Image (cartoon, rainbow, N blue to C red):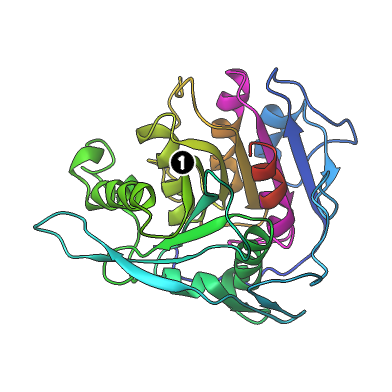
């Protein structure tokens, strides 16, 4: 499942932010016209330059940081613990780190970052510019978040990260309470409240994920109402979708968190067109969204993702 890397490494990026009232927050021109299937859904959308997201700033390596960042590599130290997923299920590893400095009185806000298929969560903490799936930018997302004061947790899928999340697996997709990954999430929530990952704020949760982890990020809105402040979905769509097969419900949860969508226009594993109806339905219900695309990129993290994810979460912090 989504196990091969895309070789698309182009440039040129566009974004489409939407106000909660459904309007566009920019009118700089149409979003990526390269895919005719998008025209009807995004014909009213404006575009911004994804290289300069509003209020995001850019990382210059200045100041104290837990991470070592160069133009070709990112490495962030982290700790690892285990979370119980029930008496009959194996323990699951969760990697985590908190920012430098004294935590706020209420604890650090928390970002749960979900891995892609067969990309163990431990890999989230380091990446090189030569790695597949844009994993340099994945690690840079972690560095940005830690430096901005967010704690980061990365849970492994089953089989020590060598598989995928249950969210879109038949049976579990429609009976989530029976899924091992549901028990994983309950264990993570309990661990956050108990202080197992440090001084964290259980009322300030955010989620981001790539591919299978992107679908799992959507699951946070579908199955854990009121827990998450905002979401960022990279190269994925609605919780029960998978690849080119995607049906988005006609009505989404009224309390669905504001959601950022990041997608490569040349993604053939998870076509960008599968994301469009999800974003459109959220927008129709008055829920804040933002689309960031790079037309020549495939199934991979975008260079714009680190700044965009941070800016999006900061808006709900």
Q: Position of residue 291 (x, y in %)?
A: 69, 41
Which of the two residues, 64 or 172, is positioned nearer the viewer here? Answer: 64
Horizontal side of 189 relative to 260 (left or right) equals: left
> Which residue extends farthest right?
28
Q: Position of residue 113 (x, y in %)?
A: 49, 57
The magenta stretch spans residue 87: no
The part of the chain drawn in magenta is 280-309
Which of the two residues, 131 or 220, is positioned nearer the viewer here? Answer: 220
Q: Which residue is mark 1?
A: 218
Horizontal side of 87 relative to 108 (left or right) equals: left
| Residue lying at 52% horizontally and 49% vertically, measured from the top left | 107
> Which residue extends farthest left?
88
Is 97 located above or below residue 240 in the figure? below
Q: Position of residue 144 (x, y in %)?
A: 68, 61
Q: Quadrant of the C terminus?
A: top right
| Residue lying at 25% horizontally and 45% vertically, measured from the top left | 170
Which of the two residues, 181 or 96, is positioned nearer the viewer here? Answer: 96
Give the secondary structure at mark 1: helix
Horizontal side of 197 relative to 139 (left or right) equals: left
Q: Quadrant of the N terminus?
A: bottom left
| Residue lying at 21% horizontally and 55% vertically, measured from the top left | 85
Is 153 located above or below residue 53 in the figure? below
| Residue lying at 54% horizontally and 72% vertically, measured from the top left | 125
Which of the two residues, 82 or 271, is positioned nearer the viewer here? Answer: 82
Residue 225 appears in the picture as rendered: yes
Q: Position of residue 104 (x, y in %)?
A: 59, 49
Is 96 located above or below residue 130 in the figure? above
Horizontal side of 240 relative to 17 (left or right) equals: left
Is 274 located above or below residue 148 in the figure? above
The magenta stretch spans residue 285: yes
């Amino acid at each position: 499942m989504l196990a091969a890397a895309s070789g698309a490494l182009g440039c040129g990026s566009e974004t489409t932010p939407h106000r909660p009232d459904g309007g566009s927050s920019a009118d700089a021109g149409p979003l990526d016209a390269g895919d005719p299937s998008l025209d009807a859904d995004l014909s009213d959308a404006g575009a911004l330059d994804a290289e300069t997201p509003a209020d995001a700033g850019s990382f210059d390596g200045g100041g104290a940081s837990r991470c070592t960042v160069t133009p070709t590599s990112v490495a962030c130290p982290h700790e690892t613990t285990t979370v119980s997923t029930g008496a009959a299920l194996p323990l699951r590893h969760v990697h985590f780190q908190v920012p430098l400095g004294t935590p706020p009185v209420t604890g650090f806000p928390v970002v749960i970052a979900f891995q892609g298929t067969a990309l163990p969560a431990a890999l989230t903490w380091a990446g090189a510019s030569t790695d597949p799936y844009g994993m340099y930018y994945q690690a840079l997302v972690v560095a940005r978040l830690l430096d901005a004061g967010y704690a980061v947790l990365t849970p492994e899928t089953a089989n020590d990260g060598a598989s995928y999340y249950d969210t879109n697996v038949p049976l579990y997709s429609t009976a989530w309470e029976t899924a091992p990954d549901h028990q994983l999430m309950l264990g993570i929530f309990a661990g956050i409240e108990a202080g197992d990952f440090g001084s964290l704020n259980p009322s300030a949760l955010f989620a981001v994920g790539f591919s299978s982890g992107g679908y799992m990020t959507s699951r946070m809105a579908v199955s854990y109402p009121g827990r998450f402040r905002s979401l960022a979905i990279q190269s994925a769509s609605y919780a029960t979708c998978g690849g080119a097969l995607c049906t988005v419900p006609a009505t989404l949860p009224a309390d669905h968190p504001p959601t950022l969508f990041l997608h490569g226009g040349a993604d053939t594993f998870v076509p960008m067109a599968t994301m469009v109806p999800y974003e459109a339905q959220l927008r129709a219900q008055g829920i804040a969204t933002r689309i960031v695309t790079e037309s020549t990129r495939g199934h991979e993290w975008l260079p714009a993702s680190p700044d965009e994810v941070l800016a999006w979460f900061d808006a709900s912090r």
